[in-house]
Amino acid sequence: MVGLNSSSVLPYAWLFKRLWLGTLGGALLLFGLSYNIYTYALFCCIMCFGAQREFYRLFPHTASPRDKLGGIVIGLLLFFYTFCARLEYISWEWGIVFLLLPFLGLLKNLYRPQKESPFENLSVIFFGILYIAVPCAILNFWTLSPEGDHNPIPLLGSCIIIWGQDSGAFIVGRLVGRHPLFFRHSPRKTWEGLLAGVFFSFVAGFLLRYTTGSTIWWCMAPLLSVTSVYGDLIASMLKRHFEVKDTGHSLSSHGGFLDRFDSFLFSVPFVALFYKIYERYEDVFDPFLSLLP
């Protein structure tokens, strides 16, 4: 969330409820992602299931409920496959099964009633998998190792930076926001909120730099500032197209799963790729990053 215009008056009771629910949800997220590999897997499955379900509900007249359920199942299987393959419980060769799915979808749609649009149905189902389930699967490459080690620090640090961005943008945008950031897709988001969010994300990156001892957070903070904003704007574009305020109501005043994790899911592929590049070429980055405080 990039910031709200100050003309929108929010009751303090609603704001207080949002804050304590956010604090509780953040604590559960930190516990789930960091306790062990099984709580991590459970949390990711809940996030994947909830977000995909809400995404498909935005398309009530496209694809059948059975097809949407199939998309959710495929998304969960994709996560479990990469989870088990990364830990070397199963062979990577089984991934060929997922490459067959688009072709099986085409064969299935040959037998649909003529009035239905097969390619529209398939595009909705597979875009839901690409948009939500694939980032969840990428998390396994980022946090797990073949030896069974579970390193939640990069994931948790990224969440903290995104929270800093989101919270700073929401508060400052609501109080002093005047200039719309992207009126066509999200008229309440403001430049003032964006700048505040960037500032708070750098504050979070600064704190992570000195608590973890890693200079990578100097790079992660600006990268996440950009990707999280675009992730939020893309979700806003989606909601504005369907004329809905939230994608769901599973999280009370915070909307649905997709409302809460839109920035995170969009950021995952970019941040995971950069993290692997940094690990491979750390000796190239460090001389430059060591010049920073």
Image (cartoon, helix red, strand yellow):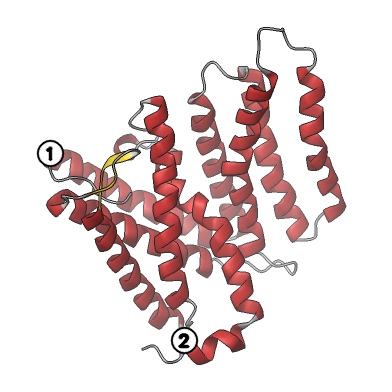
Counting from the top left corner in percent of width and height, residue 124 is at 60, 29
Residue at the extreme front: 184
Q: Residue drawn 63% across and 71% down?
A: 276
**Spot occupied by residue 140 in the image (x, y as percentages of width and height):** 65, 58
- The front one of 292 and 186 is 186
Amino acid on which disc 2 is placed: Leu
Specify the quadrant of the image occupied by residue 78. Answer: top right
Looking at the rendered structure, the kind of residue marked 1 is: Val
First in sequence: mark 2 or mark 1?
1
From the viewer's side, name the closer residue of 281 and 167. 281
Write the residue at 55% across / 60% down: 270
Q: Is residue 75 above or below residue 289?
A: above
- Nearest the eye: 59 or 117: 117
Q: Position of residue 144 (x, y in %)?
A: 66, 64
On screen, 187 above or below 210? above
x, y (%) of residue 190?
Answer: 24, 50
Q: Which mark is residue 289?
A: 2
Q: Quadrant of the C terminus?
A: bottom left
Please state the total of marks drawn on the protein image: 2
Which dot marks residue 9?
Answer: 1
In-image side of 223 versus 3 (left or right): right
* Residue 143 in sight in this render: no
Q: Residue at x 51, y 69 (%)?
A: 153
Q: Name the secondary structure under disc 2.
A: helix
